Amino acid sequence: MSARGNVLAARGSVWRPVVARISWQRLLLLLFVAAFFAYLFGPLIIMTVTAFNSADYPRVTPWDCFTTQWFGRFGRDSLLLAGLANSFFIGLGVVLLSLPIGLAAAIALSEVGERARSLLYTVFIVPILLPGIVIGIATLLFWGRIAGSFGLGHDTLLYNGIFLTILGQVCFISSYSMLIFLARIQRFDPTQTEAALDLGATPGQAFRKVLLPFLKPAIGSAAVLAFLASVENYNTTVFTIVSESTFTTVLASKVRFGIDPTISAIAVIIITTTLVAAIIQEARQRRLAARRREALAGVAAGAGAAAVMAGPTGRLLSHPASVAVLLLAVVGGLVWAGSRYDSSACQDALLQQKLQRQQELLEQQRQRMQQQAPAQPAPVPSGAAPKPASPFGGVFAPNNLGLSAPGGAVPAPAPPGAAPKPASPFGNAFAPDNLGLSAPGGATAPKIEPGAPAAPADPAPATQ
Amino acid sequence: MSRDVTLEHVTIRFGSHTAVDDAHLTIRSGEFFSFLGPSGCGKTTLLRCVSGFLEPTEGRVLIGGEDMRGVGPNRRPTALIFQNLALFPLMSVAENIAFALEVRGVGRQARRKRAVELLELIALPHVGDKKVYELSGGQRQRVAIARALAAEPQILLLDEPLSALDLKLRQHMRSELRAIQRRVGLTFIYITHDQGEALTMSDRVAVMSEGRIEQVDEPLAVYDHPKTSFVASFVGETNVLPATVTGRDGTDVTLQTDGGLIVQGFAVGRRQYRAGERCQVFVRPEQIKVAPPEPGPNRLAARVLAEEFEGNLRHVSLAVGGSVGGSGGAPAVGALAVGGQPLRMSVVNDGSLPPLQPDAALTVTFDPSVASVLPEGPLARA
Ligand SMILES: Nc1ncnc2c1ncn2[C@@H]1O[C@H](COP(=O)(O)OP(=O)(O)O)[C@@H](O)[C@H]1O
Ligand SMILES: [Mg+2]
């Protein structure tokens, strides 16, 4: 008894710290983190998966065939490609204009006095706070008015959608870049500029040789951010683009007519590009940090400490250039493999399967009709015509194709030889959206009929 | 070429605040000149005015006899070593040093050569290709000097360049700086709040307080013959005795301290004191000695409060109660006659003074010629 108690006590003391370690707080935290990441990445993962499903609508289940056809379709979509090219040029123009404007604003803010600064800051930040639609319409009206007052025709620059879009986007994107520059400039030691001046540099030289190199990382981030903000912009662009089109406006008009997985394919391309760029950037950052650490270690402990760093192989592998080459090779290989992959065999097979199912169902129906026909006269001699029409006719009625016709359950005196619930299971199989479903009714053994191949001609329109 | 700097009644104001108040002096060519004063007294402001980052509100700055008004920092023959050095972190050491040449359009080859020469001068021949952050504090210090020298200035301005270094390095860099100055023969204007730096390196020192220049003199004169209460109390350790004048004979002044002691001192600047005038007497701790048996002036009865031992020196805190032969007798412990402060005495640790027990009574004295009598004025904060 006492021995047992001791054992329990001992066990308790062993378990207590473990229990304490996975306290409910930690559990909640873990749950939160999991939920957070699911929320962040769930949609992206699903989007990525749908890009490789051959189904006409972007979806994960039911899975039809692995395919790369949507990438090909994107590559052949001339509207999208033209829009993409326009977006690219607009993005380039926006970067070239909004960076100098944002930089000038940031420098101005860092130079003026305390009171003027808060006022100026508010002015500079207003375009971000304004709805994009307002900026779009305002840009259109403003430049239209200017063009009008100069008597310029509709074929001039001021009526050109790409030019107007650049102007409209620069309005608020230069505010973004100003914020980035401002954050960096606030860490700039102004005595650096003074030192340059003191050493004989002109203000221009001090700017070019001291401030600008310091701002280089901010210029990079501002350029990337400005470009991305420009490419993804819709609210302003949809007004300023006039008769032209950009990537986003083409996508938006496509969505109006229903989407297909081409959009997923585009998403996959964008995600991959971002990932590759981010990884290369990370490799660069690490290299810089390592170099700095190495140098500092060298100062602290003499030259010997530098040798502690990784060997030449590790160094070569972690070099951003080799990381870039590796990643690009992997992506290139995947693209090459994907472009050679042909899913038509699988898709043909799937189509065959569906047609066969259809055939079978038709067959079953025909049999049932034949079975029911002789039984009918006995129970209901006069009302024969309306009754049978309800269970089967519902299936074929164009409006009810997807419905599990309630009529199927109605005929209580159903023939004993027929399937227990005939109408409801196979009724779904004909719905155009669900053609890919392995219908539950498929449990009935498929009868391979010689006449089957001839069937495609008839239900073909249903698949498209 | 003339390298002298003249400040003509220079006043610099920021709004209502006067940072520099009527600075008027000439710094001679080739001189190592220091401005010494506590933090916030306007030293940096004055230096920025000489280098051209600030224009004086009133007065003129002349360099080599030329009025510098309207001449920007990049066109003045000065180079400033900033308080934080302001080396360019993105450039190598050699690029930093050659910056002044680069902006003047000197070719790469010539720049490289000059950088090597200057690195030799500052005794760091092998750091040219390193980045600034790879250097130690003292090395950065020297690189900043080399970078400034590359601009071939006639006047080098240094704003507390040693304040970021640790004590050992600071002392080493003092002699280093002085040696560099002798080698290049430029006018150095040096700013510091550290009197040790100012006194050891400078040819002349200007002591500043709250924007005003209190005294311009050679280091020894500043120490031995302070002209204001502020200078006396700021430069070096000293005992301050608030007192009232009781009599005068030429420059010899007789006073009664607020603690009731009768002491004699000398009137700084041959000032004519009247009886009853308030003043302050300053005596350095090392000028206070254990009195010999024979009679003389300024014999004070004292009691030992505490003793601090500092290797070569012994610092003794004393309570003084009366002039021996005057009210007489050793003072009670705690009777502090010296402006509420104990009298401090520093003795060289050469074995001449036996160990002192707390509470021991002894008689101390100081020569009237080392007791500076100055009109009552603001003191430097401890
Ligand atoms: N740009 C400025 N605007 C307003 N006040 C200033 C400015 N620069 C310095 N001051 C003021 O002038 C005084 C002297 O400053 P400074 O010359 O930096 O002192 P020091 O270098 O002797 O420590 C300080 O009280 C400081 O607050
Ligand atoms: Mg200062």
Image (cartoon, rainbow, N blue to C red):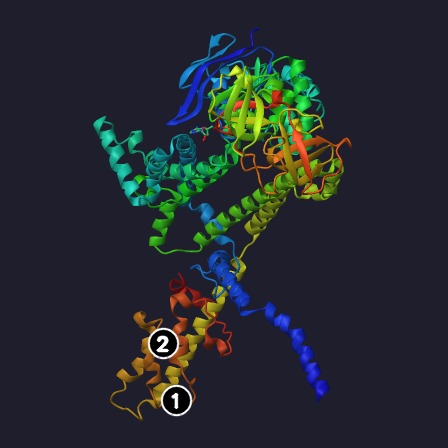
Question: What residue is rendered at 62% in x and 41% in y?
Answer: A289
Identified at 67% across, 16% down, the residue is B113
The chain under label 1 reads A
Judge from the rendering whether residue A62 lies leftward or rightward of residue B194; answer left or right: left
Residue A455 picture location, percent across and down: 43, 68
Q: Is mark 2 within 8 Å of ligand 1?
A: no
Q: Disc 1 marks which amino acid?
A: Pro
Q: Is residue A103 above or below residue A432?
A: above
Q: Nearer the viewer, residue A206 or A159?
A: A206
Outermost residue toward the top in this view: B1
- Discs 1 and 2 carry the same chain letter: yes
Residue found at the far bottom of this picture? A378
Disc 2 crowd, CA 10 A, few/some/many (<14, 14-19, 20+): some
* Observer-nearest of A170 and B264: B264
Give the amino acid at mark 2: Ser
Q: Is residue A36 visible?
A: yes
Disc nearer the start of the sequence (1/2): 2
Image location of residue B20, percent across then percent down: 45, 22
Residue carrying label 2: A404
Q: Is residue A372 above or below residue A349?
A: below
Q: Is residue A365 left or right of residue B90?
A: left
Cα separation, mark 1 vs mark 2, equals: 20 Å
